[in-house]
Image (cartoon, helix red, strand yellow):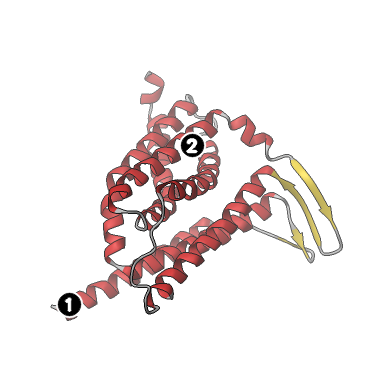
Amino acid sequence: MEHLLTSEAISALLTLTFLEIVLGIDNLIFISIITQKLSVQHQKLATNIGLFLAMLLRIVLLFGISVVVQMQSSWLTINTSWLKTNINGQAVILILGGLFLLYKSTHEVFEKVEAETTPGNETPIKLSLSKAIIQITLLNIVFSFDSILTAVGMTNGVPNAMTIMVIAIVASVGIMMAFVKPVSAFIEKHPSLQILGLSFLILIGFMLITEGAHLSETVIFNKEVGTIPKGYLYFAISFSLGIEFLNMKLKGRKNN
């Protein structure tokens, strides 16, 4: 127990918890948008189930990290004049997750921008609880891989790393559970934020695809596919949110 009270362990725990929350924001946005399509009595249940599954999947993957590492080995090699790649399990999960996120986010944008403005479509499309849970679980699997790989890299060489990672995961999900209701209410109140959030998910989907291609050492027309630094993505998201909040503030002043 005393090993968890050292400055190194506490620093690693606080940093990892913060990173888990940051990495979980996209998950939180997706859950908030999906649960808005449920009936009111099912929204809280679906949110809690979604976040609990996120925590459970992360812990299961954490204890099965050897399986995750084994998925780095190549499953299929393609070597042509214009395409070279070594496809592995991690890449398949990231690419499929990215494609699903692109499809789902684009579909949601269509429903909010086009379908809801079509005459006779004033009633919002409802989603069954089981379908919502399935969609949330699929994205949880993808986001959990990213989260666990980050956690393992952060705590490499730190004593009691497994315990620290489990505590950080539980703490981060607990914090997200505490704030998911006000976040969902705020997003639902401001439709422009819903579109902005979906646009972020499209960016994240594209990032997952490129990350999967990079893990497969993919080379297209003699150009190696690199990863998109997450700092660039978070800067774009922060900048866009800053502009949106300024617009909301100016709009509020005009209404007053």
Question: What residue is at 39 percent from the left and 38 percent from the top?
Answer: 52
Dividing the picture into quadrants, the one containing residue 208 is bottom right
Q: Horizontal and vertical percent for residue 41?
A: 28, 48
Question: What residue is at 44 percent from the left and 46 percent from the top?
Answer: 130
Q: Horizontal and vertical percent for residue 175?
A: 31, 42
User: What residue is shown with label 2?
Assistant: 58
Question: What residue is at 30 percent from the left and 55 percent from the top?
Answer: 183
In the drawing, does residue 157 fall left or right of residue 234?
A: right
Residue type at mark 1 is Arg
Asked whether residue 122 is in view, the answer is yes
Which residue is more in the foreground, 108 or 15? Answer: 108
Q: Horizontal and vertical percent for residue 13?
A: 40, 35
Spatial separation of the CA atoms under disc 2 and disc 1: 44 Å
Dividing the picture into quadrants, the one containing residue 45 is top left
Q: Horizontal and vertical percent for residue 218?
A: 74, 56
Residue type at mark 2 is Arg
